[in-house]
Amino acid sequence: MGGLWRNDDKTKGGKYLVVRRDGAIPSWPWFVLGARDPAAPAALRAYALRCKDFSMDPAYVSDVLVLAERFYQYAVEHGHGDPTAPPEVKDNQAIASALATAGTGETRYRLIAEALWHLLEQVERTATGASLFDNPYEHLKRVQTLARQRTELLMRSAGENATLIPVDGK
């Protein structure tokens, strides 16, 4: 593959979807580092030093340095990956669509909601298809929680004129 995924027409938007805690996709450019990336620990250390140069909160600088060490240890235990490798898995089309406009300021809540709905359906199928709990009451509580979460997703996305359907077409 070679370059950044976001610059390749086949993987427009990149490899990862960044979503803020409030559900918004940042409108500014962003870049995700993973612990299996062999360059990530050094990048985090350099970032921490630059934060120190800007007199940022010492606790923040310290936390970034600790994270760099955690990245390093993770790679030692699990091995390095290749951030330039081509995709290994089939894309979730709702996420790929949201990625295509990520960083542009266009919010794609409906597509994210569809992807989350699909994931909840998979979890629900697993929960109802096999006894995950020794206690039937716990099993019932889990299924009820999943149903409530699906309802909340529907209500949140209704304002975006969403029609929630499984993204794999089933």
Image: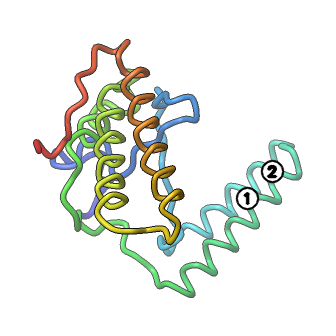
Q: Secondary structure at mark 2?
A: helix
Q: Residue furthest front?
A: 136
Q: Position of residue 38 (x, y in %)?
A: 50, 75
72 relative to 122 in the view: left or right: right
**Res 130 → quadrant:** bottom left
Q: Position of residue 10 (x, y in %)?
A: 16, 49
Residue 64 shows which numbered tag? 1
Q: Amino acid at mark 1?
A: Val
Q: Is residue 12 above or below residue 132?
A: above
52 relative to 113 in the view: left or right: right
Circle 1 Cα neighbour tier, 10 Å, few/some/many (<14 / 14–19 / ≥20):
many
Nearer-the-camera pick, 97 or 154? 154
Q: Amino acid at mark 2?
A: Tyr
Q: Is residue 13 above or below residue 76?
A: above
Q: Position of residue 29 (x, y in %)?
A: 46, 36
Q: Secondary structure at mark 1?
A: helix
Nearer-the-camera pick, 48 or 100? 100
Q: Residue tagged by mark 2?
A: 60
97 relative to 51 in the view: left or right: left
Query: Which quarter of the rendered picture does the N terminus lie within?
Result: bottom left
Query: Which quarter of the rendered picture does the C terminus lie within?
Result: top left
Circle 2 Cα neighbour tier, 10 Å, few/some/many (<14 / 14–19 / ≥20):
few
Query: What residue is at 48 percent from the left and 62 percent from the top?
Result: 136
Query: What residue is at 50 percent from the left and 30 percent from the top?
Result: 23
How many marks can you see? Answer: 2
Residue 13 shows which numbered tag? none
How is this picture coloured? rainbow
